[in-house]
Image (cartoon, rainbow, N blue to C red):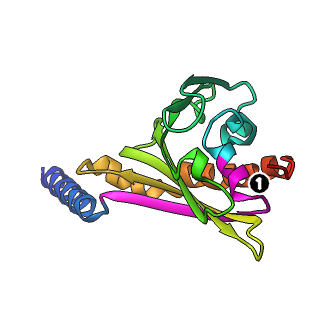
Amino acid sequence: MMRVLEFIVALIIVVVAAVIVGVVMPSSGHIDRSATIGKDMRQVYDVLNNFRRFPEFSEQRDMDRNIKFDFSGKAYGPGAEISWSSDDYKVGTGKFTIASADPSFEKVDSTAKKATIVWNVDNDWRGNDKHFTIDLERNGSRGQLTKVTWSYDVAYGFNLINRYSSLYIHGDPDVFVQSTLNSLQNVLASVQNVD
């Protein structure tokens, strides 16, 4: 009987400790990765402010060659959407929506130094208010390079399981961002340098 009581007390201590650790863990998560691409900012902006070329540089395509992409919403800019479905459980299903693009398409010219595009993320990663922020910055002595900083932000709120999932933010979200950014460089290398 004493062993059972010891086990119950130990279990209660473990549960209380897990709750306390969960409460003090961060209520949000953030990662970012950067790359400098040898293309004008306008060309990079054009590729990232719509989803028509997304299947070419998507990390999901590398994981499942049979993935199905569907386009909806607007063709370009805020409101454009891409959804995917896959039989591979690692890829699953989900949707990206362009939430904002600043400056607007017609204002991204040779004088624009920076641009920001935000994609809302709707997939099975834990958390709420998940989104990618893609910051573009003109670089190089003649402004012909573009520094791309791709960030992922998520809110976990008071859900303790979601807060523990912040330990794995350097798993799927981080791999997606880094792999997609690398593939984006390869796709943009095939784009001709013309206006």
Relative to 80, does residue 35 appear above or below in the rendering? Answer: below
The answer to whether 127 appears left or right of 151 in the picture is left
The residue under the point 26% across, 47% down is: 159
Residue type marked 1: Gln
The answer to whether 152 appears left or right of 41 in the picture is left
Q: Position of residue 51 (x, y in %)?
A: 63, 35
Residue position for label 1 = 185
At numbered mark 1, what does the secondary structure look like: helix, strand or loop?
A: helix
Q: Position of residue 184 (x, y in %)?
A: 73, 50
Q: Position of residue 134 (x, y in %)?
A: 56, 54
Which one is nearer the viewer's eye here, 129 or 124? 129
The quadrant holding residue 99 is: top left
The residue under the point 52% across, 53% down is: 103
The residue under the point 57% across, 55% down is: 174
Q: Residue furthest bottom?
A: 141
Q: Is residue 145 magenta?
A: no
The answer to whether 116 appears left or right of 39 in the picture is left
Near mark 1 (Cα within 10 A), the count class, few <14, some 14-19 or many ≥20, is: some
Q: Is residue 134 visible?
A: no
The quadrant holding residue 86 is: top right
Which one is nearer the viewer's eye here, 166 or 122? 122
Relative to 142, does residue 123 appear above or below in the rendering? Answer: above
Stretch in magenta = 27-45
Number of marks drawn: 1
Q: Is residue 132 visible?
A: yes
Q: Position of residue 125 (x, y in %)?
A: 46, 42
